[in-house]
Structures are given as structure tokens and as C-alpha cells.
Image (cartoon, rainbow, N blue to C red):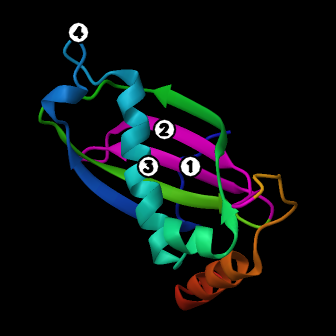
Amino acid sequence: MMRTDFSNCLTATELVRVPFPDIDPAGVVWHGRYFKYFEAARRNLLETIEYSYQQMINSGFVWPIVETAVRFVHPLTLNQQYTVTACLREWEMRLVVDYKIEDAGAKLFTKARTVQVPIGAVDHELRIGSPNILIENVRKRLESLGKL
């Protein structure tokens, strides 16, 4: 279940202004573009725990998305500015990230979740459990924020 209470998890945000190419004929953001917004926040989140995409590959893993869920509460429109926030919910066996898109007044527009699984970077075989470097980096970040 997607949750919007992000008070007890690692988070990162991305401030975005809706560009013209993201708008569909109805004048709202096309539903497929939201994943680009989620990706930007997820990338920031991973970088805050020092596990960027390059660091993933260096650790011998890639993390394909195997499941998504999105709830569109209110449509986003052209030139609208909003904040997309990513929240790391799980990291020891898989990556579960919840998202919310809000405007400056904290009005909720969208909530979502992605699930990623660890795959060997060379053989593309499913792995059981996250690499130690990821688990350790998350632990260190949680400790530095007083959340452990």
C-alpha cells in the first residue's frame, strides 16, 4: 500500500516544472510521464545514500523495476511547479520506494510506489538480498539523521 507519511524514512525531493512535451491533448500531464518525475526523486534518494546508478553497477548489481502502482489524485498541468518526494521503505531484500507529488501548499496530486529487485550486473540473474554496501550505507544515513 502506498503511504504518504514520510516522517520515518529516508527521503529526497526533486522540484520540477511541467514542460510542454509532457502534456497530452487534454491539457494535463500524460500518465506515462509521471515515471520520469519519480525517477528524478529516486535518483536523488539513491545518491543521498551513496548508491548511485554507477555505484550499483560497481557493486555488481542492477535493479530493474518489477512492480509499480500509481494513484492520480489531481492532474498536473503545463508550467505547474511541484515537488516529488521519494521515500525508501525497504532495502534489505528489494528496494521499495514510495512517492508523492505535491504543490507548494502541500496539496497531494499523486502518490505511487515502485518495487525493484537485485539482479547480477553481468549474468542478469536474480539475487537474494541486497549487497552489503547498500545495507551499510542506508544504516549510516539513518544513524546520521537520528532515525535508527
Label 2: how many Cα within 10 Å (few below 14, some 14–19, many 20+): many
Residue in view at x 26 percent, y 29 percent:
76
Residue 111 is tagged as 2
Which of the marked residues, 3 or 1, is nearer the chain's N terminus? 3
Based on the picture, tell me whether residue 106 belongs to the magenta stretch.
yes
Q: Which residue is mark 3?
A: 39
Give the number of the mark in front: 4 or 2: 4
Label 4: how many Cα within 10 Å (few below 14, some 14–19, many 20+): few
Q: Position of residue 64 (x, y in %)?
A: 64, 47
Amino acid type at circle 1 is Asp
Could you tell me how far apart the alpha carbons at marks 3 and 4 are, in whole angstroms? Answer: 24 Å
Work out whether residue 59 or residue 41 is closer to the camera in this orientation and state it.
59
Amino acid type at circle 3 is Glu
Mostly what secondary structure, the magenta segment?
Answer: strand
Which of the marked residues, 1 or 2, is nearer the chain's N terminus? 1
**Residue range (magenta):** 93-122
Q: Say if residue 77 shows up in the picture.
A: no
Residue 37 is tagged as none
Residue in view at x 19 percent, y 15 percent:
27
CB within 8 Å, label 1 to label 2: yes
Label 3: how many Cα within 10 Å (few below 14, some 14–19, many 20+): some
Q: Which residue is mark 1?
A: 98
Q: Secondary structure at mark 4?
A: loop
Which of the marked residues, 4 or 1, is nearer the chain's N terminus? 4
Based on the picture, tell me whether residue 101 belongs to the magenta stretch.
yes
